């Protein structure tokens, strides 16, 4: 049985050799909502040298590249069929911190979790954070991620002071605000190059807590009025919407308004600036939090969610009568991290999962559009199980999703049985938004059809984006399924948009 | 509605237009050139699977492919020495590029050189560690990572009743099979939560090149019969550890419970 080892006959292309040095694996790479995905080789370079070596090797094979950070985009923004996937989370060093200017310099794969844990003891907090601490900074830059303070401070793009972009040919560009290319890189869906280093603003804080006020709203217009009242004064605004309530209760829910604390306002400020103080609760109602998705799964149906949402609403009415409370930054901002893997409540079989339909509608039409959207969902028997309302302001990035108005994010369960109906519903809701001059957000989208992007983006912006993309990535090395769906549908007909 | 008629049936039409990759049933068998591995490949290909067949001897894989060329499934041969564990990620990717998706992964490679009762040959032992354990771990790691990400699939490791106790015969062989079984148990505990099943197979005496010329064999079954049982167990997901044939479970239970002070005097 034994004979001398022979040379393996596997070496096939330039990549086989690189594979011996740079960590890689063959995986099913899916959107965070689990409703789309592809099988792909995934590379995880550990520094910029490895990244450059990898780019050169992939270049020799002529294959395309999809960039992926923590994979928190709900849809197909971070996977690409027939592409090499590069996972950038290996570039995870925090490089410098300038306390006087409140600027921090990080590698692209640093996550928000790393960043806030680094900043808080230094009396700072990231200027923009999403609802989960998992995303990478490069991912946030590429999708121009916003937070609950979008209307006040802008999205991630507004915080960027400088960034390094590694192009497919291995060269490095340093971009600063004012450079035209930066307008395409921020919110550019990872199609221009790899964001390897970012210097960005952060916010000085005097306490690890924020002051939070809850206001219960009987319907959507009341909630919008509540939030509008605090627009000039508050630092964070967010509304939770019970999407299953009907009639005069349509859009009822609970608003949370939060303020950073002034010096002296928090007697326990020093203690609250410790990372340990910020930890989220380990158990919820007696369940260890890693298992909470299991009971949630039991109520993940229309009837169960109606009860859950209604009880949350009535609890909220109680909460709304309380005085303001102090809550840690982490507890207030990272609601989605309270229950790890809560998405499994939507099912874990492939083809089953969730999508989030988030639309951004100008102020004057938002109330009407969102009311009609909620009505449509109920009419068609596909209610959203979670709705979140936020206030936004526009910025000047070429593919940006934000407008001077509001967004409503709606989570929907996807399964093979409802997929067609759900996509039809989303298309109807999309029409409402487009007619009202609204926009959409790459980090959430899985449903926009070809032509939709062209309808909401000004033609000049789209043309500028295409021109800068052609300049930075002339050979079209960077690609994602999202980009193919939104930008190149005509160029690549019959593309595998959804692989199930 | 959108202007173009094409958008109206989006994305249903497009989904249907492409044969989805995951309707192709894919499997990988490592150690496919002879014995149980080859028998498993034959059965899977007859059932319509695309089977990535890995073995050191490419010529044997080639003839296996020729033999099965008229069957509904397909053999994707890959010549690879499992001792080269650094080459495993590249080999796995190469194979998966053609197999598509992985429903079933079977590690059937194993060596058992003849070792004399007073022989202590580290070179032979190293070979066994590399093939039976290190190569197994390298390949199963790749399969585990993929199945974790796709949240489906079954990993089958061919262990041995030899892994249940350290007998006199071939210390390193027993050790590698015991190590592999423990490794698989960990894998099972890690992956069961995401719906991935890990089956440890412990064959008794099977009529394969490995057992050719050995004396004192009994209850010998053919490699094909063993393959049938293994595939059945992999699908039913009832057993975590399956003795093949089942009666070896009784034997193993007895042997496992013999106290050491007796066991060391025995000649089995």
Image (spheres, coloured by chain):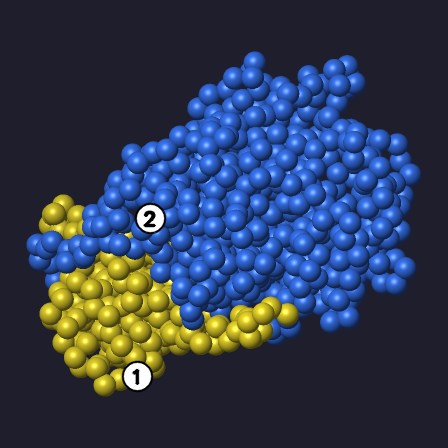
**SS under mark 1:** loop
Colour of chain A, in one word, is blue
Residue at (59% x, 58% y) in the render: A455
Q: Residues within 10 Å of mark 1 (few under 14, many from 20)?
A: few
- Closer to the camera in the image, B134 or B102: B102
> At which x and y percent is residue A334?
65, 39
The answer to whether residue A442 is above or below residue B247 is above
The answer to whether residue B40 is above or below residue B57 is below
- Closer to the camera in the image, A487 or A104: A487
What is the chain letter for disc 1? B
> At which x and y percent is residue A95?
44, 24
**SS under mark 2:** loop
Residue at (65% x, 62% y) in the render: A430
Residue at (68% x, 24% y) in the render: A208
Residue A79 visible = no
Residue at (83% x, 47% y) in the render: A223
Q: Which residue is mark 1?
A: B72
Q: Quadrant of the N terminus of chain A?
A: bottom left
Residue A474's disc is: 2
What is the chain letter for disc 2? A
Q: Which chain is painted in yellow? A: B
């Amino acid at each position: 049985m034994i004979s001398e080892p022979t040379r393996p006959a596997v070496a096939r292309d330039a990549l086989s050799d690189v594979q011996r040095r740079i960590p890689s694996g063959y995986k099913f790479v899916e959107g965070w909502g689990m409703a789309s995905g592809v099988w792909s080789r995934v590379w995880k370079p550990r520094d910029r040298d490895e990244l450059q070596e990898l780019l050169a090797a992939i270049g020799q094979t002529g294959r395309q590249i999809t960039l992926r950070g923590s994979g928190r985009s709900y849809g197909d923004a971070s996977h690409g069929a027939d592409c090499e996937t590069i996972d950038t989370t290996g570039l995870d060093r925090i490089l410098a911190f300038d306390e006087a200017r409140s600027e921090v310099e990080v590698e692209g794969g640093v996550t928000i979790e790393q960043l806030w844990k680094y900043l808080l003891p230094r009396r700072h907090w990231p200027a923009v954070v999403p609802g989960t601490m998992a995303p990478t900074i490069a991912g946030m830059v590429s999708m121009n991620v916003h937070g609950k303070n979008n209307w006040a401070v802008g999205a991630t793009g507004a915080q960027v002071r400088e960034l390094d972009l590694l192009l497919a040919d291995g060269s490095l560009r340093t971009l600063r605000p004012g450079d035209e290319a930066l307008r395409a890189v921020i919110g550019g869906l990872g199609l221009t190059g790899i964001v390897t280093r970012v210097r960005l603003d952060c916010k000085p804080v005097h306490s690890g807590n924020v002051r939070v006020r809850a206001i219960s709203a009987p319907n959507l217009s009341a909630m919008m009025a509540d939030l509008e009242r605090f627009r000039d004064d508050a630092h964070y605004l967010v509304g939770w919407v019970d999407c299953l309530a009907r009639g005069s209760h349509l859009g009822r829910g609970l608003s949370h308004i939060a303020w950073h604390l002034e010096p002296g306002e928090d007697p326990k400020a020093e203690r609250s600036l410790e990372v340990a103080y910020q930890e989220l609760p380990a158990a919820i109602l007696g369940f260890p939090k890693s298992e909470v998705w299991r009971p949630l799964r039991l109520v993940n149906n229309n009837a169960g969610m109606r009860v859950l949402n209604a009880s949350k609403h009535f609890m909220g009415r109680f909460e709304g009568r309380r005085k303001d409370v102090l809550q840690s930054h982490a507890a207030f901002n990272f609601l989605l991290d309270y229950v790890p893997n809560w998405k499994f409540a939507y099912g874990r079989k492939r083809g089953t999962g969730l999508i989030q339909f988030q639309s951004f509608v100008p102020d004057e039409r938002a109330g009407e559009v969102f009311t009609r959207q909620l009505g449509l969902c109920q009419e068609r028997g596909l209610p959203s199980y979670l709705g979140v309302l936020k206030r936004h302001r526009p910025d000047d990035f070429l593919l940006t999703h934000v407008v001077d108005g509001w967004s409503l994010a709606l989570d929907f369960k996807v399964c093979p049985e409802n997929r067609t109906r759900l996509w039809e519903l989303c298309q109807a809701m999309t029409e409402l938004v487009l007619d009202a001059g609204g926009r959409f957000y790459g980090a959430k989208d899985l449903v926009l059809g070809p032509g939709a992007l062209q309808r909401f983006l000004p033609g000049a912006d789209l043309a500028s984006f295409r021109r800068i993309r052609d300049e930075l990535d002339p050979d079209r090395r960077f690609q994602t399924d999202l980009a193919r769906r939104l930008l190149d549908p005509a160029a690549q007909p019959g593309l595998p948009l959804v692989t199930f | 509605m959108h202007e173009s008629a094409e958008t109206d049936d989006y994305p249903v039409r497009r989904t249907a237009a492409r044969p989805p990759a995951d309707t192709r049933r894919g499997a990988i068998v490592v150690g496919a050139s002879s014995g149980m591995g080859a028998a498993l490949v034959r059965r899977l290909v007859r059932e319509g699977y695309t089977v990535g067949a890995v073995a050191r001897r490419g010529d044997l894989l080639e003839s296996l492919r020729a033999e099965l060329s008229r069957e509904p499934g397909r053999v994707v041969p890959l010549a690879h020495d499992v001792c080269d564990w650094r080459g495993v990620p590249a080999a796995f990717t190469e194979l998966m590029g053609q197999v598509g998706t992985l429903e079933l992964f079977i590690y059937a490679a194993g060596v058992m050189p003849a070792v004399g009762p007073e022989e202590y040959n580290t070179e032979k032992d190293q070979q066994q560690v590399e093939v039976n354990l290190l190569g197994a771990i390298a390949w199963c790691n790749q399969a585990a990572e993929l199945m974790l990400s796709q949240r489906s699939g079954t990993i089958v490791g061919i262990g041995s009743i030899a892994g249940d106790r350290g007998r006199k015969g071939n210390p390193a062989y027993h050790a590698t099979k015991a190590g592999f079984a423990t490794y698989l148990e960990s894998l099972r505990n890690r992956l069961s939560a995401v719906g991935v099943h890990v089956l440890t197979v412990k064959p008794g005496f099977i009529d394969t090149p490995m057992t050719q010329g050995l004396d004192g064999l009994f209850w010998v079954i053919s490699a094909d019969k063993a393959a049938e049982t293994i595939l059945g167990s992999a699908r039913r997901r009832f057993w975590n550890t399956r003795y093949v044939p089942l009666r070896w479970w009784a034997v193993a239970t007895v042997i496992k419970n013999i106290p050491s002070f007796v066991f060391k005097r025995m000649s089995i």
